[in-house]
Amino acid sequence: MRLLNRTAGRLSRHRRGPLAGLAVLLLGLLISGSLYTALAPAQAQDQASDAEKVAEGKELFLASCAFCHGKNGEGIPTVRDGYQIGPSLVGVGAASVDFQVGTGRMPLASPGAQAPRKKAIFTDEETEALAAFVASLGPGPAIPDESDYSIEGLSEEEREEAISRGGQIFLTNCTACHNFNGAGGAMPRGGYAPSLHGVEGKYIYEAMLTGPQNMPNFSNGNLSPEEKRDVIAYLDSLEDAPEYAGFTLGGLGPVSEGLFGWLVGIGGLVGAAVWIASHTTRTKKSKVNA
Amino acid sequence: MSIDTSKVASSNGTEAATASKPGRAGSLATWADDRLGLATAMKKNLRKVFPDHWSFMLGEIALWSFVVLLLTGVFLTLWFNPSMGHITYEGSYDQLRGVGMSESMASTLHISFDVRGGLLMRQMHHWAATVFVASMMVHLLRVAFTGAYRKPRELNWVIGCLLLLLGTLEGFTGYSLPDDLLSGTGVRAADGFLKATPVVGTYMSFLLFGGEFPGESIIPRLYIIHVLLIPGILLALIAAHMLLLVYHKHTQWPGPGRTEQNVVGFPMLPVYAAKAGGFFFMVFGVIALMGGLMTINPLWKFGPYDPTKVTAGSQPDWYMGWPDGLLRIIPTGWESVIFGYTISWNVMLPILIVPPLMLVILMLLPFIEGWITGDKRDHHLLQRPRNAPTRTAVMVALMTFYGLAWAAGGNDIIAIKLDASINQITYFMRVAIFLGPLLAFWITRRWCISLQRHDNDKLLHGYETGIITRSPDGSYAERHLPISETAAYTLTARDRDEVFHANGDTDAAGVAAPNTRSEKLRAKLSTWMYVHNVQKPTRAELEAAHHHAEHEAELQAGLDHPVDGHQFDDHHLRDADEVPLRDH
């Protein structure tokens, strides 16, 4: 105890010294650095080879997906209400896995009308491994590269053209379900076209490519990669632009406008009428209780 | 007591009095009156009395929002170009630059993005339209629920219904003008409705569109209907509506001093001029705030109309929502083929038959009621909704029908916002649209009758004090105390309902009575309308109740302290003049 005390006393004598802060900083860096080297996962440069990734993906697949999709992704034949409960994943491609798992739709919490978007439970690496495994089952669309859905490389003029062209493509192909604002819409039997607000360009591209759930498949022959890119550029431009006209009221069209017209307009004005009528005329400045 | 005349005229007592020099406003008024002769009319009308109640101001919301519509509408016409000529948009909204559209769409975008204050004016115009029709609706409900549509105001009720119809049509023609995707979808739907009319449908469509849809005439035609034809009729009908209001005088709630022969309230000048003028600015202010803060019809996101496009959430404005709802829930297969021609009942019923039928029913309400009751007296005192249980219940049933159809018009939005299935909502609505009104009728009528009973309890036994007393034998009872005479007068200021009984088929001399069948129907309806109602207590019942109360008071009279249970209420203080009875 004496020794300890003495040491502590000696150390603490230097704790306000000019070099103390530096020493603590260096010590912290040293510890965290060595801990990271000891515990960190494989670095980018020594990425697992494709085969290893597929094997890793299969492990994950068997644990989390095989219950519905079968051990080899062949699907299960059980049909309920006209829907196959676990469809085959042969040929759906890496893009499909990246979309479904990356947006948290898969694994499904419970079967229902539609898989809702939720917090993704797999890390990016695990999603990549799962995608590699499913891609190995049969040829399908690959995960798009950022250059596929970004208009960064274009000139200012080309960008504007891309955006207005994308708007027209969006209105022709997408708004019937997703609404003019990308706010989403209803589909039969409890299904729905989800809101597109805040959805990453990659996932929108993958959704068009693979047609998840109720969504039709917009193959590259139907909407060329450039047209898909333009749609994403248009949606981004809507999110970047200010709301010129004030609060959007959900961006759902006349139904929400009518609701607010009644609540704010009629509600407020009837309130004003009550207020006016309750302040009746009087001859004295102070209110007389009659 | 003599009047002090020194303030108004001077006189030395032997010569005629001379008026004191008028003020500036007075001399101006004299100048105008000498030339226009308005003083006689004004003298009466500026002092015209209006009763005071918040519910009497609902129609004013409609009037003032109509004024806002006129003001903002004139602003919009200065830039709007009602043409279907095709041009390429080159304005300042980036996302649509280079897109082909009609000139009306382009000029609406121009108003929205390039005219100073244009977007505010557009949004105010649209919000004002929303508020205009909604306030007519609320006003209509007030008039119906209080029985204000009874004689002599039946025709003003009909005018009001026509105003509602015209306001709705005016709204439709207005939101169709910009030629954006949403309005084009609406016009396309209207074209379909026209074409669903048997035999003449296609002719009507070709006549309206000047050929096959869409043609190049529809926007200019809707425009002239929107800015000239309907506003003209609206203005004329509003004028008639107001003139009749002045002629009939405003209805009032019953109360001491208020009779069928007088109007108790405040004069037009200065009180109502100030109140109504102030209310105009409030309406203007609320609509300006809505226009400034809340998006309505962001047509730049819809883009120009193109028959190949459509958007989720394609609904009409709210007042067209209920026929749309009926259209959404009607089974799609309801069609019949006659001589090779398809009759689309699935479009005709919800659009061409039910809405006009509902309007006719609405307009006939006062006449049907008048025929059943046989009441030919003038009514200027309003009825509380509870005192006409059947009428109130009929109105609530109609409201329920309307509300369910209206909600069905937003079935997709309800589905996504409540995580429900659009199919199940539709199935539910198909049943509810029939059962809902019946259920609403039954509940409302029972509710009204219970409230009538409660009123009678208050008259006969007083109000519930909330003071629980325990008697010596251990039982608990709540004390009731008499209501004030004002409250009692107001509660009893209603007529007893008289059930109409048809005379026999023949009169005393054995001659067949005329109109036997309709009289019998009338008698049946009258029974149905009144038989469950609770009538106000008779004089004898009231006197017996008072006698009972006095007897109680006598028992306590000898005490020099309040009876147990009355220490904290106003009963034992009754003798003290300054303590009023509770006003209910």
Image (cartoon, helix red, strand yellow):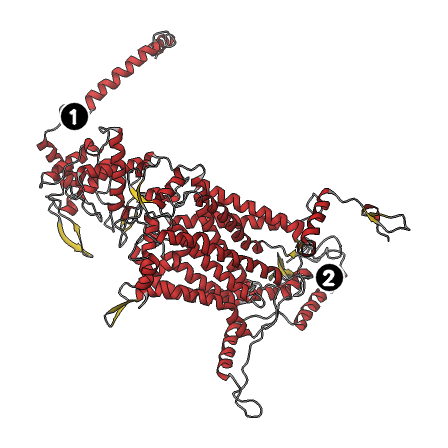
Which amino acid type is shown beneath numbered disc 1? Ala
Q: Give the image location of residue B460, x and y in percent.
A: 64, 66
Q: Chain of mark 1?
A: A
Give how far apart the Cα atoms at labels 2 and 1 are.
96 Å
User: Which part of the image, by quadrant, shows the C terminus of chain B?
Assistant: bottom right
Which amino acid type is shown beneath numbered disc 2? Gln
Q: Give the image location of residue B429, x and y in percent.
A: 35, 61
Q: Give the image location of residue B218, x and y in percent.
A: 35, 54
**Residue tagged by mark 2?**
B556
How many residues crowd around disc 1 within 10 Å: few (fewer than 14), some, or many (20 or more)? Answer: few
**Residue tagged by mark 1?**
A42
B114 shown above or below B81: above
In this rendered view, identify the residue nearer to me: A181 or B212: B212
B328 shown above or below B449: above
Identify which residue is drawn at 69% across, 53% down. Answer: B39
In the picture, measured across the screen, residue A131 lies left or right of residue A253, that is: left
Q: Chain of mark 2?
A: B
How many residues crowd around disc 2 within 10 Å: few (fewer than 14), some, or many (20 or more)? Answer: some
In the picture, measured across the screen, residue B5 lies left or right of residue B542, that is: right
Identify which residue is drawn at 68% across, 60% down. Answer: B486
> For the view shown, which residue lies furthest in the bottom direction?
B510
> For the view shown, which residue lies furthest in the right direction?
B14
- Residue B347, picture quadrant: bottom left
Report the mark closest to the observer, 2 or 1. Answer: 1
Assign a secondary structure to mark 1. Answer: loop
Q: Is residue A23 visible?
A: yes
